[in-house]
Amino acid sequence: MTDAQGKAEAFQASRQFWKFEVEGWDRPLSLKEVEQAIKDKSAEKLKLYNFLRPAVRETIQGQIDYLNEVKRDVQKQLAAKELSIGKGLGAADVRYQITSREVEQTQKVRAEQGRQMPAPVNQGEELIRIDAVASRNKDASLLQYVYAQTREKVLNNPSPQSLSRVRGRAIMARIDMLEEAERLNAALQYGDFRQISLKYAQGLDYTKSLREVSPKNALETIIRFFTDSQEQKREQRELTDAVRWQQERAEDRANKAKDFSYVMDRILGDHCRAAGVSPDKVTPMLSEQQIAEVRDFAERMPYVSRIRRDFNDAANQAERGLDERAAAAARESQQMPTHDRPAAPAEQGLSQQTPTFDRSYRDAPSCGR
């Protein structure tokens, strides 16, 4: 249910940026891109040197008409995508309600028998699944639960591989925290200027910013109070509510990412104390994609900042570790006959899991193909 809600919220927050295939175009288009193209062409049509040339005006108007057709195509695909996401959310809600009723019924029966519900016990694959849910949703309390279930086992003489995995997760959690903080600052600073998706009465999307529809001064505020239509007032209220919702959502995501990173840092500290090593001496285990993401984030930081230096050092360490693991795997593959290779053991426990970091809920432009 939480996963489905996260996908639905991410879609609602960035629907104007979702890209769709349109016939005749060699690249996907978003609603915002098409509307911006229509605005540019409309402004070009009204320029004096074009206004005085009927043939040019007709050509530009034809381009505007075509772009309006493209816009309707994108709007219909957006509506279809929203319907699909809504169905997924509805199905998740049904499963959640059924499961909740089963739990309530069990609690009721045990209460009638004078017994309480026992404490939860999870292990093995169950903990891995729970940890994956916690990572996807940046749920610090769920992560703490998984860690509490595995703490004694993973801190009993932790291996270098366990330390590397935990530090890799801690680094990616810290990047998530800093990126969500940036998004929160941007939402607070530029909320009035952002293009927000609204709906016509027919249920199709269009975009406007709060700045476009808000009065520019006190006099305009007084005049528009009496002259604006009910539709204009409704549009302004919806834009105001949408901007506030996006800011509240950004704040909630920033707080979740901060709490999740704090728990990961605490887990890393426990592992390092148990192993008797300093965290910055542990080589983080990251994939090539994650190393590239760490370096990209470091490049956005000020040149002399400590954050930039720390992340660059971590990326260099992770790259060396990745090369060493690849070389060791190649040597082992060459030395061991195929029929003698043992099956990979099922890894259990928080520090024994390969770090995975789901980016599907981000608000970056998505392609709805």
Image (cartoon, rainbow, N blue to C red):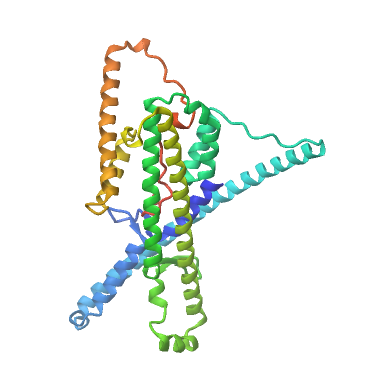
Write the residue at 27% across / 76% down: 43
Q: Position of residue 122 (x, y in %)?
A: 58, 31
Q: Position of residue 76 (x, y in %)?
A: 44, 60
With 51 as the anchor, is 271 left or right in this view?
right
With 148 as the anchor, is 265 left or right in this view?
left
The answer to whether residue 9 of the structure is visible from this angle is: yes
Write the residue at 36% across / 41% down: 171
Q: Nearer the viewer, residue 331 or 159?
A: 159
With 146 as the anchor, is 26 left or right in this view?
left
User: Where is residue 344, by image quadrant?
Assistant: top left
User: Where is residue 273, by image quadrant?
Assistant: top left
Write the residue at 47% across / 53% down: 255
Q: Nearer the viewer, residue 137 or 271?
A: 271
Total marks in image: 0
Q: Position of residue 174 (x, y in %)?
A: 38, 46
Q: Nearer the viewer, residue 207 or 55?
A: 207
Which residue is situated farthest in the left direction here? 49
Q: Say if 320 sits above or below 11 in the image.
A: above
The answer to whether residue 195 of the structure is visible from this angle is: no
Write the residue at 44% across / 58% down: 250
Q: Say if 110 sits above or below 186 in the image.
A: above
Q: Position of residue 310 (x, y in %)?
A: 29, 44
With 241 as the anchor, is 109 left or right in this view?
right
